[in-house]
Image: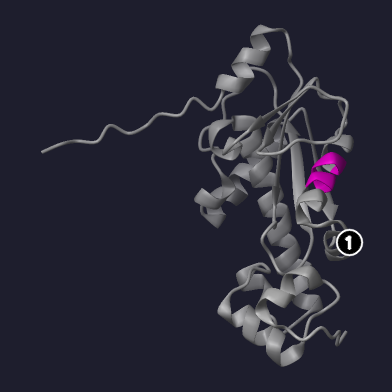
Amino acid sequence: MKTEIPIVIDRLAYERALWAEGVLAIAGVDEVGRGCLFGDVVAAAVVLPPGLVLEGIDDSKRLSEKKRDALYDVILANAVAWSVGRADAATIDKINIRQASRLAMKRAVEGLAVRPEHLLIDAETVELPLPQTKIIKGDMLSQSIGAASIVAKVTRDRLCDQIWDLNYAGYGIKDHKGYATKVHREALLALGPTPLHRRSFLSKYAIEQQTLF
């Protein structure tokens, strides 16, 4: 019987190469909410101490909510600096989702209490005069980016649970986090879009362009 050997990912490979060059303040950067119909796109930037190994860091989408929440606390307790940046639905409609995601990332980096020497970014670039490395699937391959993805995900989920779901009852935001689930689409057809819905996303689902709030 053939036994598959599990793939071991060195999530500090990119960081270690930079440390070897004397680059110590490395910020991992990632965003969440890019595919949602509702709410802000949220980005995070996290600078971790050189040499720190955090067990369990991974792409936030591959982790349970309980695991993300636990790692969120560990990341914030150990980070040299961390920051969150956001771009709202109106901005997304105005400049498109990719540019809004990049703007949220830029805001997250600019909010850091320390100036990073290098950015490790998940599949993107940020318009800042800083050395940066774009890494495809970076949230799986880099501890710094994975940490940022967790901070961004937990932050956005808590906005959905604790603020947006209360302000816009009836849409199920707490459950689907703004993604285009059947429940969400049916609520949109019944109630119409809120000011936090992305108008540029709704035409795909033939949602009437009206505002009820």
Mark 1: amino acid: Lys
| Residue under the image location 70 percent in, 35 percent down | 77
Q: Is 106 one of the magenta-colored residues?
A: yes
Q: Is residue 140 above or below residue 186?
A: above
Place of residue 208 in the rendered image (x, y in percent of width and height, measured from the top left) = 77, 86
- Residue stretch in magenta: 102-107
**Observer-nearest residue: 58 or 193?**
193
Picture colour scheme: one colour
Q: Is 128 one of the magenta-colored residues?
A: no
Q: Quadrant of the N terminus?
A: top left
Place of residue 29 in the rendered image (x, y in percent of width and height, measured from the top left) = 72, 37
| Residue under the image location 69 percent in, 45 percent down | 151
| Residue under the image location 80 percent in, 45 percent down | 102
Residue 140 placement: quadrant: top right
Q: Is residue 24 above or below residue 185?
A: above
**Observer-nearest residue: 204 or 170?**
204
**Observer-nearest residue: 22 or 80?**
22
Q: Report whether 144 appears left or right of 169.
A: left
The answer to whether residue 72 shows anywhere in this view is: yes
Residue under numbered circle 1: 94
| Residue placed furthest toward the bottom | 190
Q: Dot 1: what SS?
A: helix
| Residue placed furthest toward the left | 1
